Image: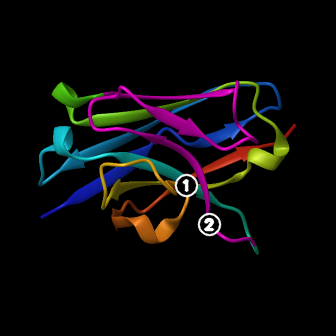
Amino acid sequence: QVQLVESGGGLVQPGGSLRLSCAASGFTLDDYAIGWFRQAPGKEREGVSWISSSADSAYYADSVKGRFTISRDNAKNTVYLQMNSLKPEDTAVYYCARGLRTSGKRWYRPDGYGYWGQGTQVTVSS
C-alpha cells in the first residue's frame, strides 16, 4: 500500500538547520509530485514547498523562500526538505504528501494531495 514516512524532525535552536526526509513506498515515486506542508497548533495546514516528479520545478512559500530547499532522489524513493536559518515560527508538525496532479498550479492547497505521511515534529526554540 502507499506509504509516506517523514523523519528528521527534532528540537533545534533558532538559526539552526534540519533536514527532513520523506520515504515513499508502495508506488513509483518518479510518477508523482510531492509537497511538504506544516501545521502549527491552532493553525491551518499550510504549504511549505513542492517539487515536480522530475525535480525540474519547485515552489516555496514566501515565508521559507531562501531558507528551505526541496530535493528528491527517486532512486532512493525519498524526498528531502533542507531547512536552514530556522526561526521559532517554523515550529510545527511537518508532513509530506503525494500530489494528485503533475502541475504545480495551486500546489499549496491540501486538497491537491491524495496521500499523507504521519508527520514529524519540528521545534525551534532556545
Q: Residue at x 12, y 64 (%)?
A: 1
Q: Is residue 64 left or right of residue 80?
A: right
The residue range painted magenta reads 43-72
- Cα distance in 3D space between marks 2 and 1: 7 Å
Identify the element where label 1 is drawn: strand
Residue, far right: 126
**Quadrant in the rendering for residue 125:** top right
- Residue 92 x %, y %: 67, 55
SS label for mark 2: loop
Q: Is residue 126 above or below residue 111?
A: above
Q: Which residue is mark 1?
A: 37
Please state the horizontal and vertical placement of residue 99, each as a whole percent of the image. 34, 56
How busy is the neighbourhood of tag 2: few (under 14 within 10 Å), some, or many (20 plus)? some
Q: Is residue 45 above or below residue 38?
A: below
Q: Residue at x 34, y 51 (%)?
A: 5
Q: Mark 2 is on which residue type? A: Arg
Residue closest to the eye, 106 or 125: 106
Residue 105 position within the rendered picture, expressed as x and y whole percent measured from the top left:
47, 53
Identify the residue position indicated by label 2 in the image: 45
In the rendered view, how is the structure colored? rainbow
